């Protein structure tokens, strides 16, 4: 774990937050969560590939992905309640 650079963790983290906000914003008027979840599931493959090139472990990539999923759910809930 000490060998992982901060930059390698920061890039997927920021990309995940931006993607989660964009997906929630794009589906803000669509009340079917299935479409949003499929769009976020498609994001998994580029994230894992990015993590591989940045030499992150699979577990770190999946943890960042789950964190982004939580952000997507809460942002979608915010748009739904408006």
Image: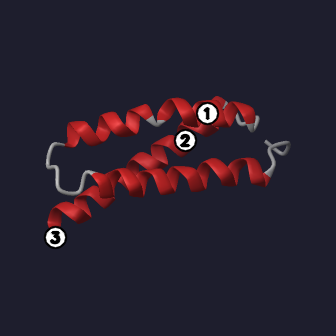
- Give the CA separation, mark 3 to mark 1: 35 Å
User: Relative to residue 27, is residue 8 drawn left or right?
Assistant: right
- Give the CA separation, mark 1 to mark 2: 6 Å
Residue plotted at (46% across, 51% down): 19
- Is residue 68 shown above or below 21? above
According to the picture, the residue beneath numbered tag 1 turns out to be 59
Residue plotted at (80% across, 44% down): 4
Label 1–label 2 contact, CB within 8 A: yes
Extreme-right residue of the structure: 3
Q: Label 1 crowding class (10 Å Cα cut-off): few <14, some 14-19, many 20+?
A: few
- Is residue 41 shown above or below 25? above
According to the picture, the residue beneath numbered tag 2 turns out to be 63
Q: Where is residue 42 shown, x and y percent of the image? A: 42, 32
Q: Which mark is residue 46?
A: none
Label 3–label 1 contact, CB within 8 A: no
Q: Label 3 crowding class (10 Å Cα cut-off): few <14, some 14-19, many 20+?
A: few
Q: Disc 3 or disc 2, which is closer to the eye?
A: 3
Q: Where is residue 2 shown, x and y percent of the image? A: 84, 45
Residue plotted at (81% across, 49% down): 5
Q: Earlier in the sequence, mark 3 or mark 2?
A: 2
Quick one: quadrant of the C terminus?
bottom left
User: Relative to residue 70, is residue 10 drawn left or right?
Assistant: right
Secondary structure at numbered mark 3: loop
According to the picture, the residue beneath numbered tag 3 turns out to be 82
- Give the CA separation, mark 3 to mark 2: 29 Å
Q: Earlier in the sequence, mark 3 or mark 1?
A: 1
Secondary structure at numbered mark 2: helix
């Amino acid at each position: 774990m000490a060998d992982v650079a901060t930059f390698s963790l920061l890039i997927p983290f920021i990309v995940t937050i931006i993607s989660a906000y964009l997906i929630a914003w794009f589906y803000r008027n669509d009340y079917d969560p299935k479409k949003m979840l499929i769009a976020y599931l498609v994001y998994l493959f580029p994230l894992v590939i990015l993590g591989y090139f940045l030499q992150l472990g699979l577990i770190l990539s999946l943890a960042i992905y789950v964190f982004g999923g939580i952000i997507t759910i809460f942002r979608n809930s915010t748009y739904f309640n408006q």
